[in-house]
Image: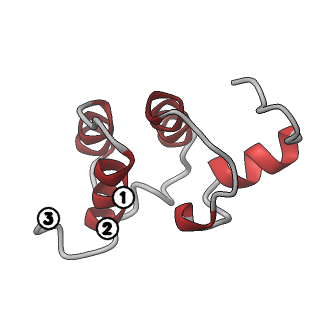
């Protein structure tokens, strides 16, 4: 994954590794690019993102997302009772 103009690899890795909240993003990002970063994070996950959900179901939900709002709903689903 490349970096965005004006953002270092470290800053992008901080985002990809879940160290900042998605609501705090300060730069424009295409939904597909964000979805790909999310999938990359799941692929490199060490049972943090998938601690309470199955990796295959998480990956499927991310792949089927069409918007930033969908990705937020997936994140909420991961952190709740999985009713969403």
What residue is drawn where x is 67% and y is 53%? 15
Q: Nearer the viewer, residue 51 or 65?
A: 65
Residue 77 horizontal/vertical position (percent): 25, 64
* Picture disc at residue 76: 2
Q: Callout 3: few (<14), some (14-19), or many (20+) C-alpha neighbours within 10 Å?
A: few
Element type where label 3 sits in the image? loop
Disc 2 to disc 3: CB gap under 8 Å: yes
* Circle nearer the N terminus (3, 1): 1
Q: Residue under label 1, please give it.
A: 72
- Quick one: quadrant of the C terminus? bottom left
Viewer-side residue, 41 vs 53:
41
Percent x, y of residue 59: 32, 37
Q: CA distance from mark 2 to mark 3?
A: 8 Å
Residue drawn at (32%, 63%) of the image: 78
Q: In the displayed structure, would residue 54 be above or below residue 84? A: above
Image quarter hosting the N terminus: top right
Query: In this picture, is 74 found above or below 9?
Result: below
**Residue under the image location 64 percent in, 47 percent down:** 16
Q: Is residue 6 left or right of residue 53?
A: right
Mark 1–mark 2 Cα distance, whole angstroms, equals 6 Å
Disc 3 and disc 1 in contact, CB within 8 angstroms:
no
Q: Quadrant of residue 56?
A: top left
- The residue at 52%/38% (across/down) is 34
Q: What is the number of the mark on residue 84?
A: 3
Q: Is residue 9 above or below residue 46?
A: above
């Amino acid at each position: 994954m490349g970096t965005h103009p004006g953002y270092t690899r470290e800053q992008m890795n901080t985002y990809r590794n879940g160290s900042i909240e998605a609501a705090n993003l300060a730069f424009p990002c295409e939904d597909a690019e964000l979805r790909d970063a999310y999938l990359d994070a799941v692929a490199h996950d060490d049972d943090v993102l998938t601690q309470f959900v199955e990796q295959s179901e998480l990956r499927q939900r991310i792949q089927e997302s069409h918007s930033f709002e969908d990705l937020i709903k997936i994140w909420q689903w991961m952190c709740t009772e999985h009713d969403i």
